[in-house]
Amino acid sequence: MRAHRFITLSASLVLLVAGAACETRAQTTTVIVARHAEKADVDDRDPPLSAAGAARAEALADALADAGVTAIYATPYRRTRDTAAPLARRLGLDVRETPVRDGVEAHAHEVARRAVAENPGGVALVIGHSNTVPAIVGALTGTTVDDLADDAYGDLFIVQLPAEGRPRLIRARFGG
């Protein structure tokens, strides 16, 4: 049953993103925002993904393989780059890094600006952290998103940004 729900979710995400892109391809930019996958429990400032995190990163790649992703953004930390890596490899894309320099809010606005400006009419994936994902979604939509729990992995925030009108936010889940 669990595998069936995952397949249904993956197919639903692909149809949702593809449908929006076909409907107004030149006018709607889609930004998908997700938190990095589970990190290894090691005493390291920049830990790699755990085995569960590597599996979740593959699940993300499976869920978004046919979603039309044209660009992928992450911070310079291993856990965000490693979460993005399986999809980037499949699609032949480079992961574009955006450092967190001047605080979470400044970072969120910079990532949102880049994702929209560099991908008009496209689909961008942004991999962030528990404290940056809500801020990035907020910068894209102008709405407040609840903080992510420390053990929350697998939330997807799909933001559709039409050239005219209000952004649309869809929240979904992927992986286990």
Image (cartoon, helix red, strand yellow):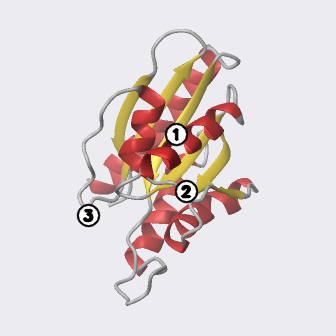
- Callout 2: SS: helix
Of marks 3 and 2, the one in the foreground: 3
Of marks 3 and 1, the one in the foreground: 1
Work out how far the residue at label 3 is from the one at label 1, CA to CA, in angstroms. Answer: 22 Å
For mark 2, what is the residue? 61
Residue 171 place in picture, x, y as percent = 34, 37
Does 121 sit above or below residue 92? above
Mark 3 vs 2, N-terminal side: 2
In front here: 22 or 3? 22
x 56%, y 61%: residue: 75
Residue 68 in view in this figure: no
**Label 3 with label 2: CB-CB less than 8 Å:** no
- Answer left or right for 172 relative to 150: right
Quarter of the figure with residue 68: top right
Image mark for residue 109: 1
Residue 37 in view in this figure: yes
- Callout 3: SS: loop
Does 43 sit above or below residue 6? below
Work out how far the residue at label 1 is from the one at label 2, CA to CA, in angstroms. Answer: 25 Å
Of marks 1 and 2, the one in the foreground: 1
Amino acid on which the number 2 mark rests in the picture = Ala
Work out how far the residue at label 3 is from the one at label 2, CA to CA, in angstroms. Answer: 22 Å
Amino acid on which the number 1 mark rests in the picture = His
x 57%, y 46%: residue: 125
Image mark for residue 13: none
x 45%, y 34%: residue: 139
- Answer left or right for 159 relative to 29: left
**Quadrant occupied by the C terminus:** bottom left
For mark 3, what is the residue? 150
Does 128 sit above or below residue 169? below
Quarter of the figure with residue 36: bottom left
